[in-house]
Image (cartoon, grey):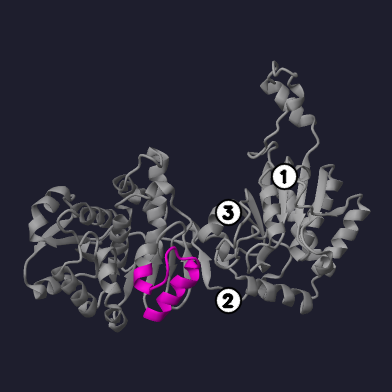
Amino acid sequence: MELYTAAQMREIDRRAIEERGVSSVQLMENAARALVEEIRALPIPGPGFRDGPTAWFTADGAHMPTREEQAEFWALRQRSAIAFCGPGNNGGDGVAAARMLLEAGWRVRCVLVGSREKMTDDCLEMERRLVEAGGVLEDFNPEDRGRYIGYDVAIDALFGVGLNSDLRPDAETAVRRMAASGWVVSADVPSGIHADTGDVMGMAVRADITVTFSRGKPGLFVGQGAAHSGRIVIADIGIPDELYPERGCEAVLVEREMLCLPRRRIDAHKGDFGRLFLLAGSRGCVGAACLAAKAAVRGGAGLVTLAVPEEIYPIAAAKCCDEAMVWPWGSDDEVVLEKAKGCTAAVIGPGLGQGERAQRLVLKLVRELACPVILDADGLNIISRHINVLDEREGPAILTPHDGEFARLSGCEAPVRDRLGAARAFARAHRCVLVLKGHRTITAAWSGVCAINPTGNPGMAKGGSGDALAGLMGALAAQKEQDAAALAVWLHGRAGDLAAQDKGEYGMTPSDLIEQIPYAMKELT
């Protein structure tokens, strides 16, 4: 799914209206209709409803309503909604939605949060239509709490994609009032969320559903925006498809339909599926190396060589699955380099440590290997102190940092507020692929295009999950899979989701995730 920035959407809207003659009022009506369609489909009461059928309670609280009585209460009760609207066109969407719900028989309150002097012409037109239908757009009173709570649905139509600064105090109060209704439905983008970065600007609406118009926006899928947007519905509001530039977007949401693994030839042999070299492990960190090797085997690499220090070789050989070859590297760096040169991809860093020998080997391999190199964990920590070695590298490089490692690599502060922008800038500056791990992992190519990954769950937030990702990514790179980094991230998250379905998020382990990799890959074959 292609994602478009706020500036791009404003330009596309302008072209639709000025060059194609599309009515701006009609676009607003279409947007409101999409909102109302989702609202009317919601089960009432919603998850945030607090009052319940209090009419059945006696004064001493002796009578508790039965399930049948509750069902009757909600069936007979008039549905209610409150629309919090800003003075701009996003507010106009909310005013139009309030009118449509009023016409459908709902009890509706429509509130203007902001200055009437700043209302756009289209928003004023929607107010006129609301008044004609018997409604009113009332001014918001931040001091009056009781008037704005307890509705079945709260519509967030304060700002949309246009916000680029922290919310004002009256808007913050409106955001708090929305949370006291059953459902919260945002128009286009939850208010307080930056449409491009997903950053929270002071305070933000936490929506149950976000109905975003025409195309997805990056901020809905990354950073805090992903946690605040709820279920995302993309609604066509009548902008011609040809106005969207074919190569205009710099961010995509990775979807299953975009991915495919080729069927293997019937006469294939192990040499056809790549040779992966893993430089990993140190005293006290044998598990990281073995998890990476096991994930690489499950990822389909034809041959996996796990190179470990001699001192941990017996432990690694005993722990590792039989399918990986555990090789103890001795004191000769050139022997290690020659071993790695015989492979089609290399993973460097899981559990490696940052000692003098490890540092020397990492820098040597990064400089001299022509095959794709995946740098993870201690490989990243070492290269962060020698970034010039990465810049001088001629072969492909994939870096897989979490926020803390990325801060060391880039010099920025953690946590990273604009994850998309930071990942894109780093990949371009150092001509590498940057996989910024976390909720909604971002894979940034040096061309500037970023892939946002939707798979994965909190059960994967355990030591060893990143090692499994590095091994899986190395296996796909060794097999010369196109876009191996983004593909590995999706498969890794999908395997985690399958593990969570089986074991639950609390009890699942990285080993459980690794065992699900074949099933995730099977879905793409």
From the top left corner, tell me how far across and down residue 177 is, in percent: 70, 48
Neighbor class of circle 3 (other Cα within 10 Å; few <14, some 14-19, many 20+) is: many
* Mark 2, secondary structure of its residue: loop
Neighbor class of circle 1 (other Cα within 10 Å; few <14, some 14-19, many 20+) is: many
Residue 186, by quadrant, is bottom right
- Mark toward the viewer: 3 or 2: 3
- Residue 480 visible at all: yes
Q: Which one is in front, 222 or 523?
A: 222
From the top left corner, tell me how far across and down residue 9 is, in percent: 66, 71
* Mark 1, secondary structure of its residue: strand
Residue 19, by quadrant, is bottom right
Q: Write the start and end of the magenta stretch as one range.
A: 407-430
Three-letter amino acid code of the residue under disc 2:
Gly
Q: Main secondary structure of the magenta part?
A: helix
On screen, residue 432 versus residue 360, left or right, reads right
Q: Are circles 2 and 1 on residues that touch, CB within 8 Å? A: no
Which mark is on residue 248? 2
Q: Residue at x 83, y 64 (%)?
A: 116
- Residue 525 visible at all: no
Neighbor class of circle 2 (other Cα within 10 Å; few <14, some 14-19, many 20+) is: few
The residue furthest left is: 331
Residue under pointer 1? 153
Which mark is on residue 183? none
On screen, residue 274 versus residue 307, left or right, reads right
Three-letter amino acid code of the residue under disc 3:
His
Ranked by sequence position, the earlier of labels 2 and 1 is: 1
What is the spatial separation of the Cα atoms under label 2 and label 1, in whole angstroms? 36 Å
Which mark is on residue 228? 3
**Figure quadrant of the C terminus:** bottom left
Three-letter amino acid code of the residue under disc 1:
Val
From the top left corner, tell me how far across and down residue 437 is, in percent: 40, 61
Q: Are circles 1 and 3 on residues that touch, CB within 8 Å? A: no
